[in-house]
Amino acid sequence: MMSELTDLGVKAIRDGVASGDFSAREVAEAFNANVAAAGALNAFIVATPEKALAAADAVDEARSAGKQLGPMAGVPIGMKDLFCTDGVQTTAASHILEGFVPRYESTVSANLWKAGAGMLGKLNLDQFAMGSSNETSYFGNVVSPWRTAGGGNAAMSPGGSSGGSSAAVSARLCPAATGTDTGGSIRQPAAFAGITGVKPTYGRCSRWGVVAFASSLDQAGPMARNVEDCAIMLEAMAGFDPKDATSLDMPVPNWAEMLDADLTGKRVGIPREYRMDGMDAEILDNWERGKTMLRDAGAEIVDISLPHTKYALPAYYIIAPAEASSNLARYDGVRFGLREMPSDKDGERAGLQDMYAATRSEGFGDEVKRRILIGTYVLSAGFYDAYYNQAQKVRALVAQDFEKAWGSCDVILAPTTPTASFPLGSLDDDPLTMYLNDVFAVPASLAGLPAMSVPAGMNSQGLPLGLQLVAKPFDEQGLMNAGLAIEQRAGFTARPDRWW
Amino acid sequence: MSVDKPTVAKIASLARISMDDAELERMVPELNNILGWVEQLGEVDTSDVEPMTAVIPNTLRLREDEVNADGLTGGDRREDVLANAPAAEHGFFGVPKVIE
């Protein structure tokens, strides 16, 4: 019974708890056990089994009392350690925030608890969500539960930055997890781990209480094992929040209830610029199969052009570091987190400026420092126009490309990533090679558009491949309908063999 | 444009991150790789383009001018605000001496 419960997704657990097939406590205990046994994956920075049990008990009591249960009632989830959780350490996987215990709850996590979900723990990630392989965490790499076929035992990347989330969901440590996506951090790890991840329209989910990376891009979303579970969870996460100035003041639709995989009359755009020189043949084949699936669902496939695609990634690597350098200025050793007090050669205690510099030197990892320096440079006097302003203009052009494309299509189909997962440590020589992982994910981020990755197949090495869908602003419904059409036809049932 | 070691040291100082010589040496080629790569943005003709300021059209909202309109973001939470400070004293953040 216990092992079966952890195979269930969000909807199955919620409905099973509601109908009394099993108790929320049994579910929480089963997932707590899986979390405790999966130390080798390093997916969690902190496990909170008592939180999961307390939330479950509250749901079981509410049910016995005949009360109305929430849309996530009895579902224990993993919380990316970028969301502030009241009374539970929140680190953004950094040393500088080690030991930081928020006295408030992020809006998104509060919404989830209100909907009846419980917390299994705080999930590992790339430090400050900067990375595409989950190798920049101060708390160690997350190891993907997937290994290559034929007995390969190299430790593979779960993707990043939401790598703890993707590893945990695919290894059945939780039925669903929160992610955040700045330039692909939900979609790329979802693709690497063979799960589904949705980045909604910018502004759908409140950023209040989420550790900021690049505020004009950061957006939270659900990661789960199928489209319907993502739809249910996104409904619980989303909603207007006056505490976030960029929050969308719009009603949250009943996405899950309205899911419909019939795409008759819909046009699916295939952006020709996403077919790049030297692309992995298996990624191209997977893309072709995706077109066939959507055509089979009734859609018309049309060629489109997004001419500035090539410039999206370099623009992102100016804009995101610029915003990060500003956002991360708050880590100064004064208000929270680490403080380093160096003394000089005469044993004199440091002044304020030395304390700032020593604290930040000790507290930030290499990738974070690199991005802060890039951001500081491109915003500095004399370079602002050439770099930052030009990047914001290119960003406007990237967004215009999509606006024009919506004249001839309703949703866009593309690969999520240029490759499947790779071994940990294999790309760490050159930051640029790592950045290229997000080449297909970043354009939708720059334009604030809803986008998702859905598992569609396996490569010849036995690793999952994802397909990416991008939709018009606010059209999460059209996005997830197309995702469902792929899910139903891809019949993706592969799961990692348990070795941990 | 490329950066040399003194420039990287200057940027690091602006960003308040102390870096020793070895770290600066290591950063120079890494930053130059990235800067060399983003330079391709110069190819794009943006003479008629306004830089993007908001990704999704949204208007700034006003709220009632109330004290503590929201319990989470209002005042009267000194203890909570100081709870995570490395050095809180007498209800204030403690910092090293600034004036000699």
Image (spheres, rainbow, N blue to C red):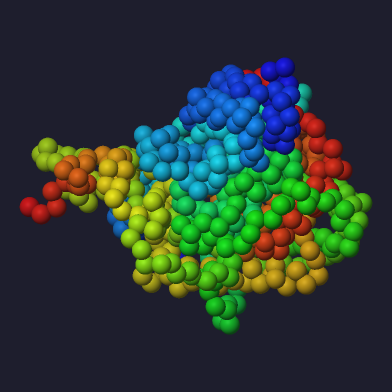
Q: Is residue A317 left or right of residue A397?
A: left
Q: Quadrant of the C terminus of chain A?
A: top right
Residue drawn where x is 17% and y is 42% of the image: B89
Residue drawn where x is 51% and y is 56% of the image: A241
Q: Is residue A76 visible?
A: no
Residue drawn where x is 39% and y is 40% of the image: A102
Against A2, residue A437 (above or below) is below
Q: Position of residue A413 (x, y in %)?
A: 78, 56
Q: Is residue A299 left or right of residue A441?
A: right
Q: Position of residue A192 (x, y in %)?
A: 68, 39
Q: Position of residue A171 (x, y in %)?
A: 66, 28
Q: Position of residue A439 (x, y in %)?
A: 65, 54
- Residue in the foreground of this view, choosing between A29 and A19: A19
Q: Is residue A109 left or right of residue A268?
A: left
- Residue in the foreground of this view, choosing between A435 and A177: A177
Q: Quadrant of the N terminus of chain A?
A: top right
- Residue in the foreground of this view, choosing between A362 and A94: A94
Residue drawn where x is 54% and y is 60% of the image: A247
**Furthest-top residue in this view:** A1
**Furthest-bottom residue in this view:** B48
Q: Is residue B48 visible?
A: yes
Number of numbered discs present?
A: 0
Against B44, residue A31 (above or below) is above
**Furthest-front residue in this view:** A65
Q: Is residue B79 left or right of residue A351?
A: right
Hey, which quadrant is residue A32 in on the image?
top right
Hey, which quadrant is residue A440 in on the image?
bottom right
